[in-house]
Image (cartoon, rainbow, N blue to C red):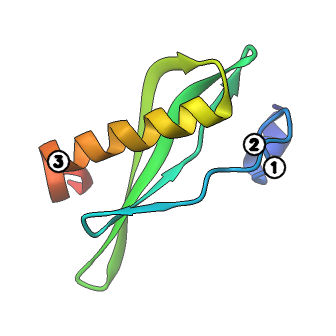
């Protein structure tokens, strides 16, 4: 993916559509896997509206997965784990 494509938000290489956001305990989890060398790095955004302000935390892990679908699944699983362990401290 070129820097121009990355900056302007084009779809991941391979043409896969991004995963829909998932609601979990008042948080929104949006998988955004990063294509690298034919695999996908686990990445996503956890967001929550706190006192009228939308707060976001970007979750990026070293895990490389074979498909965008598997990366989306694991991103949701890891985000739920982070929410359970840290809650709103994710945003500090």
Tell which tag, 3 or 2, sits nearer the viewer.
3
Disc 2 is placed on an element classified as helix
Q: Quadrant of the N terminus?
A: top right
Q: Residue under label 2, please give it.
A: 6
* Picture residue at 34% right of the left edge, 44% below the top: 79
* Picture residue at 25% right of the left edge, 56% below the top: 91
Q: Quadrant of residue 67?
A: top right
Q: Residue under label 1, please give it.
A: 10
Tell which tag, 1 or 2, sits nearer the viewer.
1
Q: Is residue 67 above or below residue 79?
A: above
Return the residue found at the far bottom.
52
Disc 1 is placed on an element classified as loop
State the CA–CA distance, disc 3 to disc 2: 31 Å
* Picture residue at 79% right of the left edge, 47% below the top: 11
Return the residue found at the far top.
37
The reply, left or right, for residue 70 in relation to residue 78 is: right
The reply, left or right, for residue 70 in relation to residue 29 is: right
State the CA–CA distance, disc 3 to disc 1: 32 Å
Expressed as whole percent of the image width and height from the top left, the position of residue 73 reads 50, 38
Q: Which mark is residue 60?
A: none
Expressed as whole percent of the image width and height from the top left, the position of residue 29 reads 43, 56
Q: Nearer the viewer, residue 81 or 86?
A: 81
Q: Quadrant of the C terminus?
A: bottom left
Q: Residue under label 3, please give it.
A: 84
Q: How many marks?
A: 3
């Amino acid at each position: 993916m070129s820097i121009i494509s990355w900056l302007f938000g084009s779809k991941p290489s391979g043409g896969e559509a991004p995963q829909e956001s998932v609601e979990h305990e008042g948080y929104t989890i949006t998988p955004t896997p990063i294509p690298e060398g034919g695999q996908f790095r686990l990445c996503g955004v956890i967001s929550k509206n706190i006192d009228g302000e939308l707060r976001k935390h970007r979750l990026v892990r070293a895990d490389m997965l074979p498909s965008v679908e598997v990366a989306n699944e694991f991103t949701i699983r890891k985000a739920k784990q982070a929410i359970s362990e840290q809650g709103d401290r994710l945003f500090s």
